[in-house]
Image: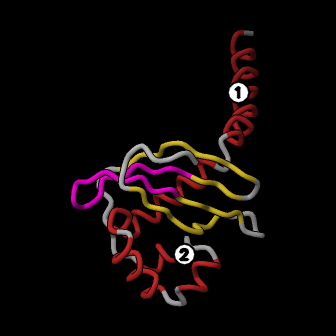
Amino acid sequence: MKCAAAISLSVLFVTALPSAAGAAEPLDTVQDIIERQIAAFLADDAATAYAFASPAIREKFATEDAFFDMVRKSYAPVYRAGNFAFGRSKIVGDMVVQEVLISGPDGKDWTALYQLLRQPDGSYRINGVHMVRAAPGPEI
C-alpha cells in the first residue's frame, strides 16, 4: 500500500510540474536566449549570435558580419561580457524587457535592457538592447 501511494504521489507531482514551469514562461525562454547570444559573442560565433536577432534587426544589418561588427563597436559590454546576472523583467503583450546587469571588459558595470519580441511562430527574438552606464538600471 505504501508503494502505491508513493507512486500516485509521484505521478501527481510529475503531472503538476509542467504547469509550474509554464508559469515562468516566457521569462525562462528569453533569459536562455540572452545567455546563448552572450555565449556566442564570447565564442566569436557570428552566425549563432545573429540567429537570435529579430527580423527588424536583420533588416538593418543584412549580414552576420555587419551585425557582429556593430555589436563589437557599439556594445562592448555585451560583446565581451564578464559576469552578468538577470535583474527585473517586464512583459507587455508580445514584448519582454529583461534587465541584465553586466560587468564590461573594462570592469565597469552596465545595465543592458534587452527587448525581445514574440514572433508569429511563437519564438522570441532580440529586437534591441539599450545600455545604461549604471547598475541597477532605470525603471522598465
Q: Amino acid at mark 1?
A: Phe
Quarter occupied by residue 82: bottom left
The number of callouts visible is: 2
Percent position of residue 4, x then y: 75, 17
Cβ atoms under marks 2 and 1 closer than 8 Å:
no
- The chief SS type of the magenta part is strand
Q: Residue furthest top?
A: 1
Percent position of residue 108, x then y: 26, 54
Element class at badge 2? helix
Q: Quadrant of the N terminus?
A: top right
Q: Amino acid at mark 2?
A: Ala
Q: At 33% from the left edge and 60% from the top edge, which residue is drawn?
A: 81
Write the start and end of the magenta stretch as one range.
Answer: 98-113
Question: Which of the two residues, 11 or 117, is positioned nearer the viewer here?
Answer: 117
Taking the magenta stretch, the answer to whether it contains residue 75 is no
Judging by the rendered image, the residue that carries numbered circle 1 is 13
Q: CA distance from mark 2 to mark 1?
A: 36 Å
Question: Which of the two residues, 12 or 68, is positioned nearer the viewer here?
Answer: 68
Percent position of residue 6, x then y: 69, 17
Judging by the rendered image, the residue that carries numbered circle 2 is 51
**95 relative position to 131: left or right:** right
**33 relative position to 4: left or right:** left
**114 relative position to 111: left or right:** right
